[in-house]
């Protein structure tokens, strides 16, 4: 019993250490991002057809902090993934250690890809649709804080959703998931993804379809990649026949 308690304490201490490193790296990256956040802000609004206003001296600081947090989050993802890998490493075989370590860079690039998809494809569509609703009826007045809050709420979910294939491959490598479970859960997964798409897009069919199709495609890619990882894992565990 004492050994079990010691193992639990060691695991909790190790988890605490990994979390402290992740949070510490995030705070450092936020500080570094604040140095360049003004240039990023100016780049984001350079082609904006509307004027943004601030209602108080703290609004622009709040926007800078939001942008810096998103930048720091992107930079923290591979660090967090590496810390999680270090935490589960003792339970992995040598081959699993090498395979799962290769997923870490992919998490970063897929997160950037998801944010780019949300910013360059989905956000302009949604924003123009909402502006068209007020055409000739209302005076358009946008505060900087509300505009960037809306922008971040629109694009950030895509950063995480685009990481679905790598997360599923990682969990398949660990034996937590397999492609057959994913296939059985397809209809429930489709339902969750469709509801997610409807919630983050305006209430028009075109916007919903433009978001639903990439999400379903990502899920099917995840199933296929899970199958590849699962079959490789099965082959690696087959006994070797000697002749």
Image (cartoon, rainbow, N blue to C red):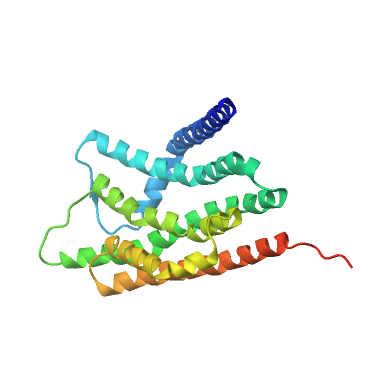
Specify whether residue 10 is in view: yes
Front-most of residues 160 and 184: 184
Residue 38 showing in the rendered view: no
The reply, left or right, for residue 202 in relation to residue 137 is right
View extreme (front): residue: 1
Viewed as shown, does residue 215 lie left or right of 130?
Answer: right
Residue furthest left as drawn: 137
Front residue (pair 33, 173)? 173
Give the total of numbered labels. 0
Residue at 36% of width from left, 71% of height from top? 210
- Of 60 and 168, which appears nearest the observer? 168
Q: Is residue 51 left or right of residue 78?
A: left
Q: On the image, which quarter does residue 184 sit in?
A: bottom left
The quadrant the N terminus occupies is top right
Residue beneath the point at 82% across and 65% down: 241
Q: Position of residue 3 (x, y in %)?
A: 59, 28
Figure check: 41 above or below 238: above
x, y percent for residue 106: 57, 55
Residue 174 vs 134, above or below: the answer is above
In the image, residue 43 above or below residue 238: above
* Residue found at x 24% / y 48%: 146
Residue 137 x %, y %: 10, 64
Task: Tell me the quadrant of the picture where the C terminus can be found.
Answer: bottom right
Q: Position of residue 176 (x, y in %)?
A: 54, 54
């Amino acid at each position: 019993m004492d050994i079990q308690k010691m193992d639990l304490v060691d695991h909790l201490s190790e988890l605490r250490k990994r979390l402290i490193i992740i949070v510490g790296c995030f705070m450092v990256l936020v500080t570094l991002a604040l140095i360049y956040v003004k240039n990023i802000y100016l780049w984001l609004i350079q082609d904006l057809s509307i004027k943004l206003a601030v209602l108080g001296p703290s609004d622009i600081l709040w926007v800078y902090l939001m942008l810096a947090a998103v930048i720091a989050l992107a930079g923290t993802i591979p660090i967090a993934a590496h810390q999680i890998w270090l935490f589960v490493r003792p339970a992995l075989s040598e081959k699993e250690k090498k395979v799962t370590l290769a997923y870490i860079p992919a998490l970063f690039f897929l997160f950037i890809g998801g944010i780019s998809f949300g910013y360059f494809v989905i956000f302009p569509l949604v924003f123009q649709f909402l502006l068209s609703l007020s055409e000739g009826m209302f005076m358009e007045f946008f505060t900087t804080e509300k505009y960037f809050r809306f922008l971040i709420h629109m694009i950030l979910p895509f950063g995480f959703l685009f990481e679905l294939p790598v997360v599923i491959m990682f969990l398949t490598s660990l034996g937590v998931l397999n492609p057959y479970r994913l296939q059985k859960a397809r209809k429930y997964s489709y339902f969750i993804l469709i509801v997610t798409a409807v919630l983050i897009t305006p209430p028009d069919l075109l916007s919903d379809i433009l978001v639903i199709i990439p999400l379903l495609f990502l899920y099917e890619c995840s199933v296929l990649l899970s199958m590849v990882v699962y079959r490789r894992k099965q082959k690696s565990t087959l006994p070797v026949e000697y002749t």
